[in-house]
Image (cartoon, grey):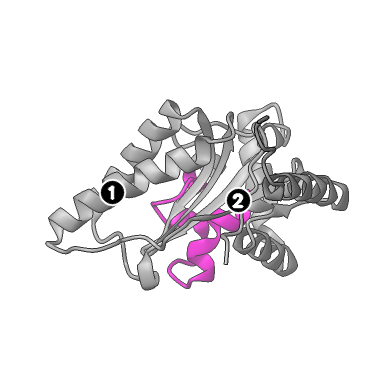
Amino acid sequence: MPRTARLVSPDVPLHIVHRGVNRQQIFFGLHDYLLYIRLLVEKAKAYHCDIHAYCLMSNHVHLLITPHTQTAPALLMKACAQQYAQYFNTAFERTGPLWDSRYKSCLVDSDEYVLACYRYIEDNPVRAGMVNAPSGYPWSSHLANAEQDHCPWLTPHASFLALSENKQARCAAYRSLFQTPCSQTQEDIRKATHSNFAFGAKNFVEKHLAADNRRRIGSRRKPKKPPQ
């Protein structure tokens, strides 16, 4: 059975999830987290991706990025996964794959959908029962986005900046987003990511569904025979 193609569109935000194989733990200590972040920053710059939000859980990674080329997400994730796995296998004297075979992703519509994805990512440790509030988890973008902690390699998305022109007011508005329930939105993001599709308004989803169908049909066409 052929793999489901990932849907990628340059300059459209993308939510990415990459899990450890069999959901096993992939981060154990300070050096592990810092190394993956260093790789992420280096490869995002090399492959032209803006990072808006992230969360490194003990056995998986969440990212919200905007790639500027079609191939950027795959190149970014492949480079990070390979180099981190090499380090991990050496450090822990193990062999074999570290990551689940493929990362999953979904396109994200602008405005409230991007902000919902910010929240979905940074609220992950709370949903997992690890902390009582996202500000209590050190390995996510929440302190940078909500508390103005210095993080020069994060690029605020336009929807985040639109919360307010004033930094303090923007952080306050962003923190307020975490005070309202959004259980259905969480399920929508989860389903879209698992199916490698799109999360957004109806017209956004239908637009990318049509484009994806045309791409799939085109890929199934038999190549023309060369002239005899």
Image x and y of residue 220, in percent: 69, 50
> Does 120 appear in magenta?
yes
Q: Residue furthest right?
A: 203
Viewer-nearest of discs 2 and 1? 2
Residue 153 located left or right of residue 12 = left
- Using the rendered view, name the quadrant where residue 180 is placed: bottom right
- SS for dot 1: helix
Would you place residue 2 above or below residue 170 in this image?
Answer: below
- Estimate how packed mark 1 is, as few (under 14), some (14 to 19) or many (20 or more) residues with alpha carbons within 10 Å: many
Confirm whether residue 152 shows in the render. no
Residue 205 in picture, x, y percent from top left? 80, 51
Image quarter hosting the N terminus = bottom right
Query: Going 69% across and 31% down the picture, which residue do you hit?
Result: 158
Residue at point 54%, 69% (across, down):
127
**Disc with the residue nearer the chain's start (2 vs 1):** 2
Residue 45 image point, x, y percent: 43, 27
**Which is more toward the observer, 60 or 165?**
60
Q: CA distance from mark 2 to mark 1?
A: 23 Å
Q: Residue at x 39, y 39 (%)?
A: 40
Q: Amino acid at mark 2?
A: Arg
**Magenta stretch?**
118-143
Q: Is residue 79 above or below residue 68?
A: below
Q: Quadrant of the C terminus?
A: top right
Residue lying farthest to the front in this orientation: 228
- Labelled disc at residue 6: 2
Q: Secondary structure at mark 2?
A: loop
Question: Which residue is disc 1 drawn over?
Answer: 84
Q: Residues within 10 Å of mark 2 (few under 14, many from 20)?
A: some
Which label belongs to residue 76? Answer: none
Badge 1 amino acid: Tyr
Residue 126 part of the magenta segment? yes
Q: Residue at x 72, y 47 (%)?
A: 221
